[in-house]
Image (spheres, rainbow, N blue to C red):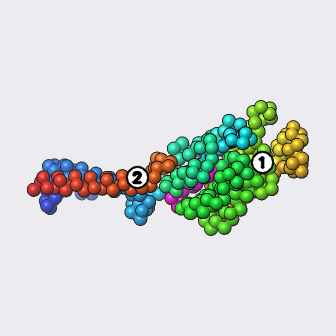
Amino acid sequence: MFSILIRPKYFESVIINLKRVRTDKYIVNLSLQGQFHRYFLLLLLFGSLYYLAGIAPSPLGSFLQSNGNPREGWAVLMEMNFYSSGNDLGTGYADTQKWNLTLQTLGWQTHHILIHQGEITRQTGEAALHFLAMNADANDVVLFFVFAHGNYLLTDVHWNTWFPQQWMSLESHEKLFIVASCTSELLLQPLYDDPSSHIHIASTEGDEYAWAGLPEEGLPIIGEIFTHFFTNALINGSADSNTDGEVTVEEAFEFATPLSRNYITSVVFPAFPDFAEMCDNTAPHPVLDDNYPDSFSLQVDLGDPPLMPSGFPPELGFLLAGIIVVISVFAFAFYMRQRR
Ligand SMILES: [Ca+2]
Ligand SMILES: [Ca+2]
Ligand SMILES: [Ca+2]
């Protein structure tokens, strides 16, 4: 048995005992004595830097977190049921509930899902995009679902004047945008030039009407019809057309489209002849803009809690980061001075 004592300036209290048990086996004893506060302060400093790497979207952040970066999922589910015009869609927020259930069944963490049930404005929409921008990195899956009257989104919220640019600037290479509304393809059209890999889905073509079932109508499906079949298909093994054990977004779209069109033709049209006439007796055609080279999977890794809550201004994050650095540096300097 022999011991190694390391006595450089700041590590005089580290002693390593190396005990030889057999010719090919050693037991190592490591003991730390003396000035523990130094090591704790160093740990505090490194811990703070790691935290900062998380909240500050900086090269430091990408550098420190480049190893073991999980493919997390981040979702925004927005739904508006009540309108000042009185043209309400009182579905009891059925669509966002179905999406939430599907994502949780697929293993998405609840704190990765931002649910907005109420008035949709440019402000609430931009806050939701901000939640995605602050949390999702390049290899994360980003999902944005919106349910509202199509004409409200286009003419009241002026959706196409602010959403496309901010959506296209998100860092993620796996983006899924889904609109459930009348004339919903009109919200996809400004995004056809989005160069990043994505899938965009609309429940109807640009001149078609969507159907959302209301409880008082007495029909089986409450909420928008395509959303109903699509969210169901994602967690339904029957939609796994290549039987690889997973239902991809593309598979769910192919599975849900004929079912939703058939329901509208065979259940909604007979019950609401006026709606059938508005649609020329043709059920709306869901639209798929698939600019994602492979199959789009919604099976994601577990990740960290959100780095910033929704609407948390980034300036506050940087301020907090600065305060942590300053306190750590001062604390370290103070203890080093005490030592002398
Ligand atoms: Ca990631
Ligand atoms: Ca499959
Ligand atoms: Ca694809």
- Amino acid on which the number 1 mark rests in the picture: Ala
Q: Residue furthest left?
A: 340
Q: Which comes before the other along the chain, label 1 or label 2?
A: 1
Mark 2 highlights which residue? Answer: 316
Q: Where residue 301 appears, x then y in whole percent? A: 53, 51
134 to the left or right of 183: left
Q: Residues within 10 Å of mark 2 (few under 14, many from 20)?
A: few
- Residue 145 vertical placement versus 220 (above, below): below
- Residue 205 vertical placement versus 109 (above, below): below
Magenta includes 151?
no
Q: Where residue 258 appears, x then y in whole percent? A: 80, 50
Query: Do we see residue 54 in this rendering?
Result: no
Give the residue drawn at x 81%, y 53%. 208
- Residue 168 vertical placement versus 47 (above, below): below
Magenta includes 139?
yes
Nearer the camera: disc 1 or disc 2: 2
Q: Where residue 40 appears, x then y in whole percent? A: 24, 50
At mark 2, the secondary structure is helix
Q: Is mark 2 within 8 Å of ligand 1?
A: no
- Segment colored magenta: 137-145
